[in-house]
Image (cartoon, rainbow, N blue to C red):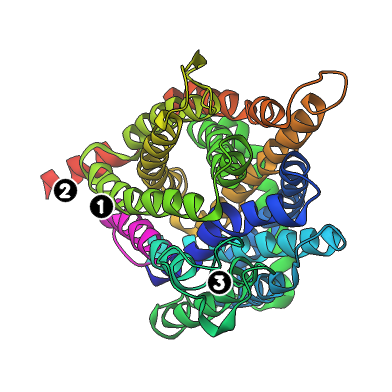
Amino acid sequence: MLFDWAQQPFHTLIITFVFAPYFASAVAPDAARGQELWGLATGIGGLAIALSSPVLGAIADATGPRKPWIFVFSVIGILACASLWFALPGAGHVTLVLIAVALAVFGMEFAAVFNNAMMPDLVPRSDLGRLSGSAWGLGYVGGLLSLVLVLGFMSAQPDTGRTLLGLQPVFGLDAAMREGDRAAGPLTALWYALFVLPMFLFTPDVARRKAATGAIREGLRRLSETLRRLPGERSYFSFLLSSMFYRDALNALYAFGGIYAAGVLSWSITQIGLFGILANVTGALGAWLGGRMDKAFGPKTVVSLSIIVLTACALLVISTTREEILFVKLSGATSLPDIAFFVAGAFIGAAGGSIQAASRTLLVDQVPRERVTEAFGLYALSGKATSFIGPFAIALATGYFASEAFGLSTQDAQRLGVTPILALFLIGLVLMPFVKSRHQEVAESAEGR
Protein backbone atom coordinates (compact mmCIF):
# COMPACT_ATOMS: atom_id res chain seq x y z
CA MET A 1 0.00 0.00 0.00
CA LEU A 2 2.89 2.40 0.68
CA PHE A 3 3.92 2.14 -2.98
CA ASP A 4 0.80 4.10 -3.93
CA TRP A 5 1.57 6.60 -1.15
CA ALA A 6 5.11 6.95 -2.54
CA GLN A 7 4.10 7.38 -6.17
CA GLN A 8 0.99 9.56 -5.94
CA PRO A 9 2.89 12.89 -5.62
CA PHE A 10 4.19 12.27 -9.15
CA HIS A 11 0.63 12.38 -10.46
CA THR A 12 -0.50 15.12 -8.07
CA LEU A 13 2.45 17.51 -8.22
CA ILE A 14 4.02 16.85 -11.63
CA ILE A 15 1.28 15.67 -13.96
CA THR A 16 -1.72 17.59 -12.66
CA PHE A 17 -1.68 20.43 -10.17
CA VAL A 18 1.71 22.16 -9.90
CA PHE A 19 4.34 21.48 -12.54
CA ALA A 20 2.02 21.01 -15.55
CA PRO A 21 0.25 24.38 -15.13
CA TYR A 22 3.61 26.01 -14.30
CA PHE A 23 5.03 24.63 -17.54
CA ALA A 24 2.06 25.89 -19.56
CA SER A 25 2.01 29.34 -17.99
CA ALA A 26 5.73 30.11 -17.49
CA VAL A 27 7.92 27.76 -19.57
CA ALA A 28 5.95 27.35 -22.80
CA PRO A 29 5.36 30.33 -25.12
CA ASP A 30 1.64 30.50 -24.23
CA ALA A 31 -1.06 28.39 -22.54
CA ALA A 32 -2.43 26.78 -25.72
CA ARG A 33 1.07 25.93 -26.96
CA GLY A 34 1.90 24.63 -23.49
CA GLN A 35 -1.11 22.30 -23.56
CA GLU A 36 -0.01 21.08 -26.99
CA LEU A 37 3.61 20.45 -25.93
CA TRP A 38 2.60 18.78 -22.67
CA GLY A 39 0.41 16.40 -24.66
CA LEU A 40 3.36 15.52 -26.88
CA ALA A 41 5.69 14.85 -23.91
CA THR A 42 3.27 12.66 -21.95
CA GLY A 43 2.24 10.97 -25.19
CA ILE A 44 5.82 10.02 -26.06
CA GLY A 45 6.34 8.58 -22.58
CA GLY A 46 3.13 6.59 -22.93
CA LEU A 47 4.14 5.32 -26.38
CA ALA A 48 7.43 3.97 -25.00
CA ILE A 49 5.50 2.06 -22.31
CA ALA A 50 2.97 0.78 -24.82
CA LEU A 51 5.67 -0.70 -27.04
CA SER A 52 7.60 -2.49 -24.29
CA SER A 53 5.39 -3.31 -21.30
CA PRO A 54 3.72 -6.52 -22.56
CA VAL A 55 7.08 -8.05 -23.50
CA LEU A 56 8.73 -7.12 -20.21
CA GLY A 57 5.64 -8.29 -18.29
CA ALA A 58 5.81 -11.70 -19.96
CA ILE A 59 9.53 -11.95 -19.22
CA ALA A 60 8.89 -11.01 -15.59
CA ASP A 61 6.27 -13.77 -15.30
CA ALA A 62 8.77 -16.25 -16.70
CA THR A 63 11.53 -15.26 -14.27
CA GLY A 64 9.36 -14.60 -11.20
CA PRO A 65 10.46 -11.65 -9.00
CA ARG A 66 9.05 -8.19 -9.69
CA LYS A 67 11.14 -6.04 -7.32
CA PRO A 68 14.24 -5.85 -9.58
CA TRP A 69 12.08 -4.41 -12.35
CA ILE A 70 10.49 -1.91 -9.97
CA PHE A 71 13.95 -0.79 -8.83
CA VAL A 72 15.28 -0.14 -12.34
CA PHE A 73 12.30 1.91 -13.46
CA SER A 74 12.12 3.72 -10.13
CA VAL A 75 15.66 5.00 -10.64
CA ILE A 76 14.70 6.36 -14.07
CA GLY A 77 11.61 8.08 -12.64
CA ILE A 78 13.46 9.54 -9.65
CA LEU A 79 16.26 11.05 -11.74
CA ALA A 80 13.84 12.47 -14.32
CA CYS A 81 11.63 14.08 -11.66
CA ALA A 82 14.62 15.59 -9.84
CA SER A 83 15.84 17.16 -13.10
CA LEU A 84 12.65 19.22 -13.42
CA TRP A 85 14.20 21.68 -10.96
CA PHE A 86 16.15 23.04 -13.95
CA ALA A 87 12.96 23.94 -15.89
CA LEU A 88 13.50 27.70 -15.62
CA PRO A 89 10.83 30.20 -16.69
CA GLY A 90 11.05 31.05 -20.38
CA ALA A 91 10.96 29.03 -23.58
CA GLY A 92 14.70 28.67 -24.17
CA HIS A 93 15.02 25.03 -23.07
CA VAL A 94 11.55 23.54 -23.64
CA THR A 95 12.87 20.45 -25.44
CA LEU A 96 15.00 19.33 -22.49
CA VAL A 97 12.08 19.81 -20.11
CA LEU A 98 9.82 17.73 -22.35
CA ILE A 99 12.41 14.93 -22.52
CA ALA A 100 12.58 14.88 -18.71
CA VAL A 101 8.78 14.75 -18.45
CA ALA A 102 8.60 11.86 -20.94
CA LEU A 103 11.27 9.92 -19.00
CA ALA A 104 9.48 10.57 -15.71
CA VAL A 105 6.24 9.18 -17.13
CA PHE A 106 8.12 6.17 -18.52
CA GLY A 107 9.89 5.31 -15.27
CA MET A 108 7.07 5.94 -12.79
CA GLU A 109 4.35 4.25 -14.82
CA PHE A 110 6.50 1.20 -15.53
CA ALA A 111 7.31 0.77 -11.84
CA ALA A 112 3.56 0.70 -11.17
CA VAL A 113 3.04 -2.10 -13.72
CA PHE A 114 5.23 -4.49 -11.73
CA ASN A 115 3.99 -3.31 -8.34
CA ASN A 116 0.37 -3.96 -9.37
CA ALA A 117 1.30 -7.47 -10.45
CA MET A 118 2.39 -8.31 -6.90
CA MET A 119 -1.09 -7.87 -5.41
CA PRO A 120 -2.71 -11.26 -6.24
CA ASP A 121 0.12 -13.07 -4.43
CA LEU A 122 -0.46 -11.10 -1.21
CA VAL A 123 -4.19 -11.58 -0.42
CA PRO A 124 -7.08 -13.88 -1.40
CA ARG A 125 -9.27 -12.77 -4.32
CA SER A 126 -12.09 -11.87 -1.91
CA ASP A 127 -9.86 -9.23 -0.27
CA LEU A 128 -8.29 -7.91 -3.45
CA GLY A 129 -10.82 -5.11 -4.01
CA ARG A 130 -10.43 -3.84 -0.47
CA LEU A 131 -6.62 -3.94 -0.73
CA SER A 132 -6.63 -2.08 -4.05
CA GLY A 133 -9.13 0.51 -2.84
CA SER A 134 -7.33 1.10 0.44
CA ALA A 135 -4.00 1.42 -1.38
CA TRP A 136 -5.41 3.99 -3.81
CA GLY A 137 -7.00 5.84 -0.89
CA LEU A 138 -3.68 5.93 0.97
CA GLY A 139 -2.05 7.16 -2.22
CA TYR A 140 -4.47 10.07 -2.45
CA VAL A 141 -3.71 10.99 1.16
CA GLY A 142 -0.01 11.04 0.25
CA GLY A 143 -0.75 13.20 -2.76
CA LEU A 144 -2.79 15.54 -0.58
CA LEU A 145 -0.04 15.90 2.02
CA SER A 146 2.60 16.55 -0.63
CA LEU A 147 0.37 19.16 -2.26
CA VAL A 148 -0.17 20.92 1.07
CA LEU A 149 3.61 20.97 1.63
CA VAL A 150 4.26 22.54 -1.77
CA LEU A 151 1.42 25.08 -1.72
CA GLY A 152 1.65 25.94 1.96
CA PHE A 153 5.41 26.23 2.34
CA MET A 154 7.18 26.28 -1.05
CA SER A 155 5.17 27.64 -3.98
CA ALA A 156 4.63 31.41 -3.78
CA GLN A 157 2.70 33.78 -6.00
CA PRO A 158 5.13 35.85 -8.08
CA ASP A 159 3.21 39.07 -7.33
CA THR A 160 2.96 38.62 -3.53
CA GLY A 161 5.91 36.36 -2.76
CA ARG A 162 3.70 34.48 -0.30
CA THR A 163 2.52 30.86 -0.20
CA LEU A 164 -1.07 29.67 0.20
CA LEU A 165 -0.65 29.95 3.99
CA GLY A 166 0.66 33.49 3.67
CA LEU A 167 4.23 32.47 4.51
CA GLN A 168 7.58 33.22 2.96
CA PRO A 169 8.76 30.16 0.98
CA VAL A 170 11.02 27.82 2.94
CA PHE A 171 14.72 27.39 2.08
CA GLY A 172 14.74 30.89 0.57
CA LEU A 173 12.97 29.73 -2.60
CA ASP A 174 12.68 32.60 -5.08
CA ALA A 175 9.09 33.36 -6.07
CA ALA A 176 10.12 35.41 -9.12
CA MET A 177 12.05 32.42 -10.55
CA ARG A 178 9.15 30.10 -9.64
CA GLU A 179 11.50 27.95 -7.56
CA GLY A 180 8.61 26.73 -5.39
CA ASP A 181 6.82 25.29 -8.42
CA ARG A 182 10.03 23.81 -9.82
CA ALA A 183 10.80 22.24 -6.44
CA ALA A 184 7.84 19.91 -6.99
CA GLY A 185 10.20 17.77 -9.10
CA PRO A 186 12.94 17.15 -6.49
CA LEU A 187 10.33 16.79 -3.72
CA THR A 188 8.54 14.10 -5.74
CA ALA A 189 11.82 12.27 -6.32
CA LEU A 190 12.81 12.41 -2.63
CA TRP A 191 9.32 11.43 -1.44
CA TYR A 192 9.22 8.42 -3.73
CA ALA A 193 12.73 7.25 -2.86
CA LEU A 194 11.94 7.39 0.86
CA PHE A 195 8.48 5.86 0.99
CA VAL A 196 9.02 3.10 -1.55
CA LEU A 197 11.63 1.53 0.75
CA PRO A 198 9.12 -0.43 2.93
CA MET A 199 7.86 -2.22 -0.18
CA PHE A 200 11.39 -3.27 -1.10
CA LEU A 201 12.28 -4.27 2.47
CA PHE A 202 9.14 -5.97 3.77
CA THR A 203 6.72 -6.98 0.98
CA PRO A 204 7.30 -10.61 -0.08
CA ASP A 205 8.16 -11.23 -3.72
CA VAL A 206 7.65 -14.45 -5.67
CA ALA A 207 10.53 -16.89 -5.98
CA ARG A 208 12.73 -16.99 -9.06
CA ARG A 209 11.26 -19.46 -11.54
CA LYS A 210 14.09 -19.77 -14.04
CA ALA A 211 17.40 -18.22 -15.06
CA ALA A 212 17.24 -14.91 -16.87
CA THR A 213 19.09 -16.35 -19.88
CA GLY A 214 16.07 -18.30 -21.08
CA ALA A 215 13.49 -15.87 -19.79
CA ILE A 216 13.39 -13.65 -22.86
CA ARG A 217 12.60 -16.56 -25.19
CA GLU A 218 10.04 -17.98 -22.76
CA GLY A 219 8.46 -14.59 -22.16
CA LEU A 220 8.13 -13.86 -25.85
CA ARG A 221 6.65 -17.31 -26.48
CA ARG A 222 4.02 -16.85 -23.76
CA LEU A 223 3.18 -13.37 -24.96
CA SER A 224 2.77 -14.62 -28.52
CA GLU A 225 0.40 -17.35 -27.33
CA THR A 226 -1.60 -14.83 -25.29
CA LEU A 227 -1.96 -12.43 -28.22
CA ARG A 228 -3.16 -15.27 -30.46
CA ARG A 229 -5.77 -16.33 -27.88
CA LEU A 230 -6.82 -12.85 -26.85
CA PRO A 231 -9.52 -12.15 -29.48
CA GLY A 232 -11.23 -15.41 -28.46
CA GLU A 233 -11.23 -14.46 -24.76
CA ARG A 234 -14.11 -12.03 -25.09
CA SER A 235 -14.24 -10.78 -21.51
CA TYR A 236 -10.47 -10.23 -21.20
CA PHE A 237 -10.27 -8.63 -24.64
CA SER A 238 -13.28 -6.38 -23.99
CA PHE A 239 -11.89 -5.25 -20.65
CA LEU A 240 -8.54 -4.30 -22.17
CA LEU A 241 -10.30 -2.33 -24.91
CA SER A 242 -12.70 -0.63 -22.51
CA SER A 243 -9.99 0.29 -20.01
CA MET A 244 -7.82 1.54 -22.85
CA PHE A 245 -10.37 4.25 -23.55
CA TYR A 246 -11.74 5.18 -20.13
CA ARG A 247 -8.33 5.25 -18.43
CA ASP A 248 -6.90 7.41 -21.17
CA ALA A 249 -9.83 9.80 -20.79
CA LEU A 250 -9.24 9.95 -17.03
CA ASN A 251 -5.50 10.48 -17.42
CA ALA A 252 -6.14 13.26 -19.94
CA LEU A 253 -8.62 14.84 -17.55
CA TYR A 254 -5.99 14.77 -14.80
CA ALA A 255 -3.13 15.90 -17.04
CA PHE A 256 -4.94 18.80 -18.67
CA GLY A 257 -7.30 19.85 -15.85
CA GLY A 258 -4.81 22.24 -14.26
CA ILE A 259 -3.64 23.57 -17.62
CA TYR A 260 -7.26 24.09 -18.67
CA ALA A 261 -8.14 25.94 -15.46
CA ALA A 262 -5.08 28.18 -15.79
CA GLY A 263 -5.88 29.08 -19.39
CA VAL A 264 -9.69 29.23 -19.47
CA LEU A 265 -10.57 30.37 -15.95
CA SER A 266 -7.30 32.29 -15.40
CA TRP A 267 -6.68 30.43 -12.15
CA SER A 268 -3.44 30.93 -10.26
CA ILE A 269 -1.26 28.04 -9.11
CA THR A 270 -2.74 28.55 -5.64
CA GLN A 271 -6.32 28.16 -6.89
CA ILE A 272 -5.34 25.10 -8.90
CA GLY A 273 -3.66 23.75 -5.77
CA LEU A 274 -6.84 24.20 -3.73
CA PHE A 275 -8.69 22.38 -6.49
CA GLY A 276 -6.08 19.61 -6.21
CA ILE A 277 -6.44 19.41 -2.43
CA LEU A 278 -10.20 18.96 -2.79
CA ALA A 279 -9.78 16.34 -5.52
CA ASN A 280 -7.28 14.39 -3.41
CA VAL A 281 -9.53 14.43 -0.34
CA THR A 282 -12.50 13.13 -2.34
CA GLY A 283 -10.17 10.77 -4.22
CA ALA A 284 -9.05 9.14 -0.96
CA LEU A 285 -12.65 8.80 0.18
CA GLY A 286 -13.75 7.56 -3.23
CA ALA A 287 -11.01 4.93 -3.45
CA TRP A 288 -11.72 3.69 0.07
CA LEU A 289 -15.49 3.59 -0.52
CA GLY A 290 -14.96 2.07 -3.96
CA GLY A 291 -12.97 -0.76 -2.41
CA ARG A 292 -15.89 -1.54 -0.10
CA MET A 293 -18.34 -1.32 -3.01
CA ASP A 294 -16.05 -3.60 -5.00
CA LYS A 295 -16.25 -6.22 -2.24
CA ALA A 296 -20.05 -5.86 -1.99
CA PHE A 297 -21.13 -5.43 -5.63
CA GLY A 298 -18.09 -6.37 -7.69
CA PRO A 299 -15.54 -4.26 -9.60
CA LYS A 300 -17.56 -4.16 -12.84
CA THR A 301 -20.38 -2.22 -11.15
CA VAL A 302 -17.92 0.23 -9.61
CA VAL A 303 -16.15 0.83 -12.93
CA SER A 304 -19.39 1.38 -14.89
CA LEU A 305 -20.85 3.82 -12.35
CA SER A 306 -17.57 5.73 -12.17
CA ILE A 307 -17.44 6.16 -15.96
CA ILE A 308 -20.92 7.72 -15.94
CA VAL A 309 -19.96 10.18 -13.20
CA LEU A 310 -16.67 11.09 -14.91
CA THR A 311 -18.39 11.70 -18.25
CA ALA A 312 -20.83 14.12 -16.63
CA CYS A 313 -17.96 15.90 -14.86
CA ALA A 314 -15.94 16.20 -18.06
CA LEU A 315 -18.92 17.76 -19.80
CA LEU A 316 -19.29 20.26 -16.95
CA VAL A 317 -15.59 21.18 -17.14
CA ILE A 318 -15.55 21.63 -20.91
CA SER A 319 -18.72 23.72 -20.88
CA THR A 320 -17.50 26.11 -18.15
CA THR A 321 -15.78 29.43 -18.79
CA ARG A 322 -15.84 32.81 -17.11
CA GLU A 323 -18.92 33.69 -19.17
CA GLU A 324 -20.94 30.43 -19.20
CA ILE A 325 -21.76 27.12 -17.51
CA LEU A 326 -23.06 24.14 -19.49
CA PHE A 327 -22.88 26.48 -22.51
CA VAL A 328 -25.46 28.79 -20.89
CA LYS A 329 -24.43 32.46 -20.82
CA LEU A 330 -24.05 34.08 -17.40
CA SER A 331 -24.99 37.67 -16.68
CA GLY A 332 -22.26 39.83 -15.15
CA ALA A 333 -19.25 38.88 -13.06
CA THR A 334 -19.92 35.83 -10.92
CA SER A 335 -18.06 33.13 -9.02
CA LEU A 336 -20.37 30.38 -10.34
CA PRO A 337 -17.79 29.09 -12.87
CA ASP A 338 -15.26 28.63 -10.06
CA ILE A 339 -17.84 26.82 -7.91
CA ALA A 340 -18.83 24.57 -10.84
CA PHE A 341 -15.19 23.68 -11.45
CA PHE A 342 -14.62 22.84 -7.80
CA VAL A 343 -17.75 20.64 -7.74
CA ALA A 344 -16.57 18.84 -10.86
CA GLY A 345 -13.14 18.37 -9.30
CA ALA A 346 -14.64 16.81 -6.17
CA PHE A 347 -16.57 14.22 -8.15
CA ILE A 348 -13.66 13.59 -10.54
CA GLY A 349 -11.47 12.82 -7.54
CA ALA A 350 -14.00 10.44 -5.98
CA ALA A 351 -14.90 8.61 -9.20
CA GLY A 352 -11.29 8.56 -10.38
CA GLY A 353 -10.10 6.92 -7.17
CA SER A 354 -12.85 4.31 -7.35
CA ILE A 355 -12.36 3.41 -11.01
CA GLN A 356 -8.60 2.99 -10.79
CA ALA A 357 -8.80 0.77 -7.72
CA ALA A 358 -11.62 -1.38 -9.13
CA SER A 359 -9.87 -1.72 -12.49
CA ARG A 360 -6.95 -3.55 -10.90
CA THR A 361 -9.33 -6.07 -9.33
CA LEU A 362 -11.32 -6.52 -12.54
CA LEU A 363 -8.14 -7.23 -14.50
CA VAL A 364 -7.05 -9.94 -12.05
CA ASP A 365 -10.46 -11.57 -12.65
CA GLN A 366 -9.59 -12.06 -16.32
CA VAL A 367 -6.44 -14.22 -16.03
CA PRO A 368 -4.91 -17.06 -13.96
CA ARG A 369 -2.38 -15.99 -11.35
CA GLU A 370 0.67 -17.22 -13.27
CA ARG A 371 -0.12 -14.75 -16.09
CA VAL A 372 -0.84 -11.70 -13.96
CA THR A 373 2.34 -9.68 -14.66
CA GLU A 374 1.88 -10.23 -18.37
CA ALA A 375 -1.74 -9.14 -17.91
CA PHE A 376 -0.68 -5.92 -16.20
CA GLY A 377 1.79 -5.41 -19.04
CA LEU A 378 -1.05 -5.72 -21.53
CA TYR A 379 -3.14 -3.53 -19.23
CA ALA A 380 -0.40 -0.90 -19.45
CA LEU A 381 -0.31 -1.40 -23.21
CA SER A 382 -4.07 -1.03 -23.52
CA GLY A 383 -3.91 2.13 -21.43
CA LYS A 384 -0.79 3.52 -23.04
CA ALA A 385 -1.93 2.67 -26.55
CA THR A 386 -4.32 5.58 -26.22
CA SER A 387 -2.38 7.39 -23.53
CA PHE A 388 -0.37 8.78 -26.39
CA ILE A 389 -3.35 8.93 -28.77
CA GLY A 390 -5.39 10.93 -26.24
CA PRO A 391 -2.76 13.58 -25.49
CA PHE A 392 -1.79 13.67 -29.17
CA ALA A 393 -5.46 14.15 -30.10
CA ILE A 394 -5.75 16.98 -27.58
CA ALA A 395 -2.50 18.49 -28.83
CA LEU A 396 -3.64 18.28 -32.46
CA ALA A 397 -7.15 19.54 -31.71
CA THR A 398 -5.80 22.43 -29.66
CA GLY A 399 -3.30 23.39 -32.35
CA TYR A 400 -5.95 23.00 -35.06
CA PHE A 401 -8.52 25.22 -33.35
CA ALA A 402 -5.82 27.72 -32.34
CA SER A 403 -4.81 28.23 -35.99
CA GLU A 404 -5.51 31.52 -37.69
CA ALA A 405 -8.06 29.86 -39.98
CA PHE A 406 -10.56 29.66 -37.11
CA GLY A 407 -9.85 33.00 -35.53
CA LEU A 408 -10.68 31.63 -32.08
CA SER A 409 -9.36 32.96 -28.80
CA THR A 410 -6.79 30.95 -26.85
CA GLN A 411 -9.50 30.02 -24.33
CA ASP A 412 -11.91 28.71 -26.96
CA ALA A 413 -9.09 26.74 -28.62
CA GLN A 414 -8.29 25.11 -25.28
CA ARG A 415 -11.96 24.22 -24.69
CA LEU A 416 -12.40 22.58 -28.08
CA GLY A 417 -9.01 20.92 -27.76
CA VAL A 418 -10.05 18.73 -24.80
CA THR A 419 -13.36 17.46 -26.23
CA PRO A 420 -11.83 14.04 -27.21
CA ILE A 421 -12.09 13.17 -23.49
CA LEU A 422 -15.88 12.78 -23.75
CA ALA A 423 -15.70 10.35 -26.67
CA LEU A 424 -13.10 8.18 -24.89
CA PHE A 425 -15.26 7.82 -21.77
CA LEU A 426 -18.33 6.84 -23.79
CA ILE A 427 -16.48 4.21 -25.82
CA GLY A 428 -15.20 2.63 -22.60
CA LEU A 429 -18.74 2.50 -21.17
CA VAL A 430 -20.19 0.85 -24.30
CA LEU A 431 -17.69 -2.03 -24.04
CA MET A 432 -18.26 -2.81 -20.34
CA PRO A 433 -21.32 -5.13 -20.79
CA PHE A 434 -19.02 -7.68 -22.48
CA VAL A 435 -16.72 -7.90 -19.43
CA LYS A 436 -17.22 -10.59 -16.77
CA SER A 437 -16.27 -10.41 -13.11
CA ARG A 438 -15.48 -13.28 -10.72
CA HIS A 439 -17.11 -11.39 -7.86
CA GLN A 440 -20.28 -13.47 -7.90
CA GLU A 441 -18.56 -16.86 -7.99
CA VAL A 442 -16.16 -15.79 -5.23
CA ALA A 443 -19.11 -14.66 -3.10
CA GLU A 444 -20.98 -17.92 -3.75
CA SER A 445 -17.87 -19.92 -2.91
CA ALA A 446 -17.50 -18.04 0.37
CA GLU A 447 -21.15 -18.73 1.24
CA GLY A 448 -20.65 -22.41 0.43
CA ARG A 449 -17.74 -22.63 2.86
Quarter holding the N terminus is bottom left
Q: Residue at x 44, y 57 (%)?
A: 369
| Residue that carries the numbered disc 3 in the rendered image | 188
SS for callout 1: helix
Observer able to see residue 222 = no
Q: Nearer the viewer, residue 18 or 211?
A: 18
Q: Residue at x 34, y 40 (%)?
A: 299
SS for callout 3: helix
- Expressed as whole percent of the image width and height from the top left, the position of residue 133 reads 32, 53
- Expressed as whole percent of the image width and height from the top left, the position of residue 278 reads 37, 50
Q: Which residues are magenta?
A: 122-143
Q: Is 239 displayed left or right of 124 in the figure?
A: right
Dot 3 or dot 2: first in sequence order is 3
Q: Nearer the viewer, residue 198 or 21?
A: 21
Are the residues tagged 3 and 2 within 8 Å (C-beta)? no
Q: Quadrant of residue 93?
A: bottom right
Structural crowding at the residue carrying mark 2, measured as other residues with C-alpha within 10 Å and reported as few (<14), some (14–19) or many (≥20): few
Question: What amino acid is labelled 2 in the image?
Answer: Ala
Residue 126's disc number: 1
Structural crowding at the residue carrying mark 1, measured as other residues with C-alpha within 10 Å and reported as few (<14), some (14–19) or many (≥20): some
SS for callout 2: helix
Give the CA separation, mark 3 to mark 2: 42 Å
Residue 446's disc number: 2
